[in-house]
Amino acid sequence: MDIAVLGATGTIGSLVADRLEAAGNDVRRLSRASGVNTETGEGLEAALEGADVVVDATNIATIRATPAVRFFARSAKNIAAAAKKGGAGRVVCISIAGVTKPGAALGFGYYRGKCAQERGYRAAPIPTTIIRSAQWFELGEQMVAQASLGPVAVLPQMRMAPLATERAADHIAEEIIATGRGVVPEIVPGQNARLAPEDGEDPRNRIVRLRGPEEMTSAQLVRRILGSRGSVAGRSPSLVAEYPYLGRQLAGGVLVPSSEGTIVDDLTLDQWLVA
């Protein structure tokens, strides 16, 4: 297959592109560095022309709602239109588990952007797969880097069911390849799911959820990494605390997909730490 990966220089985009190439697909690695701007549409139609599948792994480095909503909403509209015009059979959007649930985006503007992205694709004129992944183990480093002052790290209280980024990329690539070839994977309770399309939505749309095997809070994640490696993001805070400053919903577990109807990866945090 000929697969276009937008956001291919980012963490998940590059990993997914690697796996798609290893499986024998022709991969177009697209980003702003290659002259493609999804928000403005610059270079997009030419970049996607003739692709069988288009993968949206784009990202924006902001926590503010206004730029996040603007970027993701405009990008989804532009990508869907260009993919349709270029003859692609499907768009695959990499999203975040739980962000569309009520209250999830109240304290974190970036999640509002991802909600706008999903709305755009579910209303798009082309079949779409939305892959909602739980957080990654590597999020602990980002949190510590952003929420530390001296020996203290005060993390946003967040209940999660994280998995390794590389394992997420494995599952995402498998889904892209299967649906891109017109093969809809069997729905197995506890492993994967196709959620029912909304009214007026393309019945060929798919929503797939990913999560890790364990549930924990952000502080528990970081403490376990510290206990194994001695540092996180080059820091070794002596106190790791958490506070629900991103909202009670995130603290309570709104981002944690149930095991039922979800692909549950089997690599535990302890296994990942010693790998």
Image: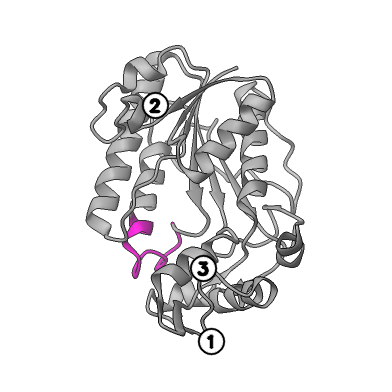
Q: Amino acid at mark 1?
A: Ser
Q: Which residue is mark 1?
A: 238
Gap in angstroms between the C-alphas marked 2 and 3: 46 Å
Dot in front, 2 or 3: 3
Q: Tell me if mark 3 has few (under 14), some (14-19) or many (20+) residues whose alpha carbon lies within 10 angstroms of its own.
A: few
Secondary structure category for the residue under label 3: loop
Q: Amino acid at mark 2?
A: Pro
Q: Tell me if mark 2 has few (under 14), some (14-19) or many (20+) residues whose alpha carbon lies within 10 angstroms of its own.
A: some
- Quarter of the image with the C terminus is bottom right
Question: Nearer the N terminus, badge 1 or badge 2?
Answer: 2
Q: Residue 243 occupies which quadrant of the picture?
A: bottom left
**Is any part of residue 206 visible from this angle?**
no
Q: Tell me if mark 1 has few (under 14), some (14-19) or many (20+) residues whose alpha carbon lies within 10 angstroms of its own.
A: few
Magenta span of residues: 100-112
Which mark, residue 125? Answer: 2
Q: In the drawing, does residue 224 fall left or right of residue 116?
A: right
Residue 64 on the magenta span:
no
Q: Are marks 2 and 3 in contact (CB under 8 Å)?
A: no
Residue 52 in the image, given as x and y percentages of width and height? 53, 18
**Is any part of residue 78 visible from this angle?**
yes
Secondary structure category for the residue under label 1: loop
Dot in front, 1 or 2: 1
In this view, 58 is above or below 29 = below
Gap in angstroms between the C-alphas marked 1 and 2: 52 Å
Residue 244 in the image, given as x and y percentages of width and height? 42, 81
Q: Which residue is mark 3?
A: 234
**Measuring 51% from the left and 68% from the top, which residue is drawn there?**
234
